[in-house]
Amino acid sequence: MKQPHAGPATPAARTGDATTRTDTVDPSDPARTPLEALHTHLDAHLPGAARAWLDQALAEAAAHPGTHGPISVWELRVAEAGRRCGDEYADAARVLVLNAADADPAALSRVYRQGTAAERRAVLYSLPHLVPGADALPLIEDALRTNDTRLVAAAVGPYAARHLDAHAWRHAVLKCLFTGVPVDHVAELQRRARADAELARMLGDYAAERTAAGRPVPEDLHRVLALTEPAPAPHGADGSDTPHGKES
């Protein structure tokens, strides 16, 4: 389900009240951050002019959601977020504007296809907040075909974890290893890799190819390979209440 629009931040947030926990929010990972917390964080950290711009952009997007004419006003705000908010907060600001605009898969696809790499990345980050089903998978698949490591990192977030099938998800993990994207970016890695024998085989083949070519095997490969091992059976799962070995 789509999360509600992030409303205006409270005065406590703007004064840096510890109860807002803005220090725990990572604006560089807006896909995994609740929108309200993201908005509170930006409201507390953006300088005055940038904060005023964001408030206006969100109000405009909420007042005129959807698509209107050749380009909607909120699409212009998405495009200028980097200049207005700076690189550190641009992704988060764009995600908030997309949410306020109630952007559907068609609108998100248009922004993605026509936008810069930074705008495409923001669309990918917005998917878990805006698209409950698998309708936006073509955008994930497109990003995974690129060699832009920031797009790949954004593509393997929570939306991919929920909706990529096993085959595509395994290849997404391999794509991270090929391109040097840290597997920390892969959402729900432990859950999806657990007891995945096919992923283990693919990782083993890749490691063998690297070794044969005299190239180092990425440390992340060993980390993922360890996750593919089946969970140990609980004590006594074989029906015996006694430990293996000689009875006392």
Image: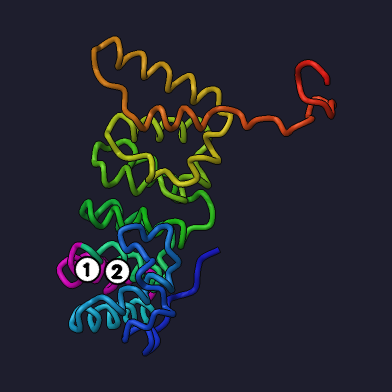
Residue placed farthest to the bottom in the image?
11
Residue 81 circle label: 1
Q: Is residue 74 magenta?
A: yes
The earlier-in-sequence mark between 2 and 1 is 1
Q: Is residue 84 magenta?
A: yes
The reply to whether callout 2 and callout 1 are in contact (CB within 8 Å) is yes
Residue shown at the point (30%, 17%) measured from the top left: 210
Residue placed farthest to the top in the image?
212
User: Mark 1, residues whose alpha carbon is within 10 Å: few (<14), some, or many (≥20)?
Assistant: many
Quote the CA–CA distance across marks 2 and 1. Answer: 7 Å
Q: Main secondary structure of the magenta part?
A: helix
Q: Where is residue 141 shown, x and y percent of the image?
A: 39, 40
| Figure quadrant of the N terminus | bottom right
Write the start and end of the magenta stretch as one range.
65-87
Q: Where is residue 80 shown, x and y percent of the image?
A: 19, 68
Q: Where is residue 98 shown, x and y percent of the image?
A: 36, 67
55 versus 162 height, above or below: below
User: Mark 2, residues whose alpha carbon is within 10 Å: few (<14), some, or many (≥20)?
Assistant: many
Depth check, front residue: 57 or 186: 186
Disc 2, SS:
helix
Residue 93 circle label: 2
Q: Where is residue 160 shown, x and y percent of the image?
A: 46, 45
Residue 170 relative to residue 191: left or right: left
Residue 162 relative to residue 62: left or right: right
Q: Name the amino acid type tagged 2.
A: Ala
Q: Name the amino acid type tagged 1.
A: Ala
Q: How is the image coloured?
A: rainbow
Disc 1, SS:
helix
Figure quadrant of residue 78: bottom left
Depth check, front residue: 184 or 119: 184
66 versus 201 height, above or below: below
